[in-house]
Image: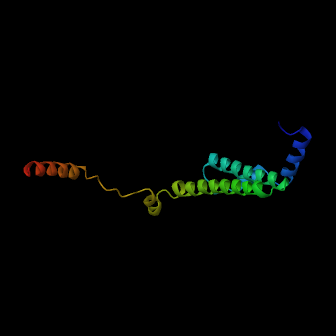
């Protein structure tokens, strides 16, 4: 069951009284060249702060405080990951160090050696019969 209208308004007034607007949150990501990503990051940043203010207003403690902290850590880590990924793989995608992040040396499987080994063992066992 949802909060009553009056309760909801009080909560929203408290949060909005302590939270900057969406434009302020979007401006934090002015280094992001992709407008869609910039808007999404602003949404995520604002939602993380909104939830923080909601739980702060409830004076979260004990398990709820730990949940509040966990939500913040996960939210901010996701935001940082998206920013770093964008900067590396969009803005610096042709830099040799970034290219090196995507290249992996692999060894070719030596299946033919295994097959030859099995054939050799089989022929050896046929030659040495008791």
Query: Left or right of 120: which side holds 74?
Result: right
Q: How many marks?
A: 0
Q: Residue at x 74, y 51 (%)?
A: 46
Query: Left or right of 126: which side holds 75?
Result: right
Which quadrant of the figure contains the N terminus?
top right
> Among all residues in the image, which is located at the extreme top?
1
Q: Is residue 118 visible?
A: yes
Q: Position of residue 76 (x, y in %)?
A: 67, 56
> Among all residues in the image, which is located at the extreme right?
6
Q: Position of residue 40 (x, y in %)?
A: 66, 47
Q: Residue at x 83, y 37 (%)?
A: 2
Q: Residue at x 87, y 47 (%)?
A: 11
Coloring scheme of the render? Answer: rainbow
> Among all residues in the image, which is located at the extreme front?
130
Q: From the viewer's side, name the closer residue of 13 and 6.
A: 6
Q: Position of residue 31 (x, y in %)?
A: 63, 57
Q: Position of residue 8 (x, y in %)?
A: 87, 42
Q: Residue at x 20, y 48 (%)?
A: 115
Q: From the viewer's side, name the closer residue of 37 and 69.
A: 69
Q: From the viewer's side, name the closer residue of 91 and 68.
A: 68
Q: Is residue 29 visible?
A: no
């Amino acid at each position: 069951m949802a909060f009553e209208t009056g309760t909801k308004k009080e909560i929203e007034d408290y949060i909005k009284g302590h939270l900057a607007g969406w434009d302020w949150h979007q401006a934090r990501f002015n280094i992001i060249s992709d407008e869609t990503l910039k808007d999404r990051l602003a949404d995520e940043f604002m939602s993380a702060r909104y939830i923080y203010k909601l739980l702060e207003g409830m004076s979260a403690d004990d398990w709820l405080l730990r949940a509040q902290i966990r939500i913040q850590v996960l939210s901010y880590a996701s935001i940082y990951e998206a920013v770093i990924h964008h900067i590396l793989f969009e803005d610096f995608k042709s830099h040799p160090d970034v290219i090196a992040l995507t290249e992996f040396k692999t060894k070719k499987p030596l299946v033919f050696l295994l097959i030859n080994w099995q054939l050799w063992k089989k022929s050896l066992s046929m030659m040495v019969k008791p």
